[in-house]
Image (cartoon, rainbow, N blue to C red):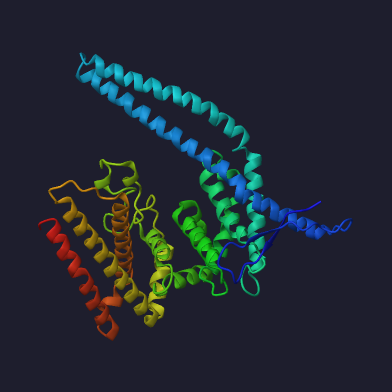
Amino acid sequence: MALVRVINMNPLDQGRSIILDTAPLPVNIVDSTTSLLELLDSIILFYHLVAKKPLAKVAFLRNSMLEYISASQDLKIRLGEVTKKNVESETVQQELSRSINVFNTKLIEQGRHMAWIRAAVYSEEKQLLLAWLLKVVTLTLMNASLEGNMFSFVPDFYLEALADLCVGLRNHMHPTAHIEKIPDYQEMFLTIAKFLCDHFMDPRIVNVDSKSTLLLTLAGFVFNPLTLEAMENVPEESRMKLVTNLLKSYKNRAWAESNWILVRFWQGNGFAFRYDRSPHLLKKGGSKSFQQESISQPRKPCPSIIYQGHIRDVLLENLQDTTAFLNSLLNLLNWTFSEFIGMVQEIHNVSSRPERVFIESRQLKICATCFDLTISLLRVLEMIITVVPNIFNNASQSFSENLLFRLCQVYVPKLFYCCILFNI
């Protein structure tokens, strides 16, 4: 009888690390430790490949139901307004009533489905099982990180399962199944937060997929208020280590994700940065795909005073590294803004032609991404200028004058372009 065995070949190859070995185990020779390890690997792999998908689907159903409820309430308010203002508008009233009945029918159907989901999928028993599995994965990864190249003998799907389980408990099951029902959920998230802080940009991690997974998991923790609280409660040494790595030069590394994490620490304190969504977008029409939340303003504001203080301390501690970081940030800001202005000008020129020209949605999305990246870089620069103004106005330091000159050099063209665009 052949057993499918998962083997990891992680450190050197940059592709997928899962290899399925179907070689039969020796007959009548059973090692209990090996069997348990293979069983654990299979359980975690099963969750990563199969079990997480139903959780995501039912979470989508819950969100869809909330949208139907919101739309139905809006229609009822509109129907009441129409009835008060114009009693004779029977056609409009009938159409609104018909739409409300359609939504109510759909909500009844979804309500029955959600009742089954709450009993079978989002049960307390299932929640506790996922919490247990998350603790096992976390403990395994912590032990695997104690020596040698990190995760050399741990399959990649352990890291991916860590991210999947965190999202499943934090976003998919919660708030239908309240995360507070897990007895020690705060300690569980605190342990994971410390693990992420300690191993972010760890030079021992040689696999690209592992680096990316850790970075995205860290970003997920920072973007959620519940797990951000856990990030703020880890030991100060771990917090300082994380901030030090975040403030390294953006040159030759995945800078966008690190920059978004810094933006999240600031969101809520910056100029006009206190909104869930920018006011000018609230009544924006157009395609739904272009009304998504922007990268530069990803979630409800939840600034971290603790991490802002650490950012100040790290920037003042090593001025040489600070100069390198700010120079790389200003270079990227100049590049992203130039790309955005160039694409806007190109789109404007195309749309101004007398003949009808189709502008690809891909081009619009790239332009929007360049804008979001520019805004996120500006927000980080705004945070640094506000939190550590001495870096730019300290007359006793020669580098301050150079940084102030570069800051003006980058800002003046942007103000010039904005004045031209808005005819100021």
Q: Is residue 32 above or below residue 413?
A: above
Occupied quadrant, residue 331? bottom left
Residue 66 shown left or right of residue 43 in the figure: left
Residue 162 shown left or right of residue 83 in the figure: right
The one of 340 and 273 positioned closer to us in this rendering:
340
* Image spot of residue 89 (x, y percent): 22, 16
Q: Quick check: can you spot residue 131?
A: yes
In the displayed orientation, state which residue is furthest to the left: 423
> Residue at 34% of width from left, 54% of height from top?
297
* Image spot of residue 40 (x, y percent): 71, 54
Q: Is residue 258 above or below residue 94?
A: below
Occupied quadrant, residue 366? bottom left
> Residue at 28% of width from left, 49% of height from top?
278
* Image spot of residue 347 (x, y percent): 21, 55
In the displayed orientation, state which residue is furthest to the right: 28
The one of 376 and 98 positioned closer to us in this rendering:
98
In the displayed orientation, state which residue is furthest to the front: 355
Residue 123 shown left or right of residue 108 in the figure: right
- Specify the quadrant that holds the C terminus: bottom left
> Residue at 49% of width from left, 36% of height from top?
61
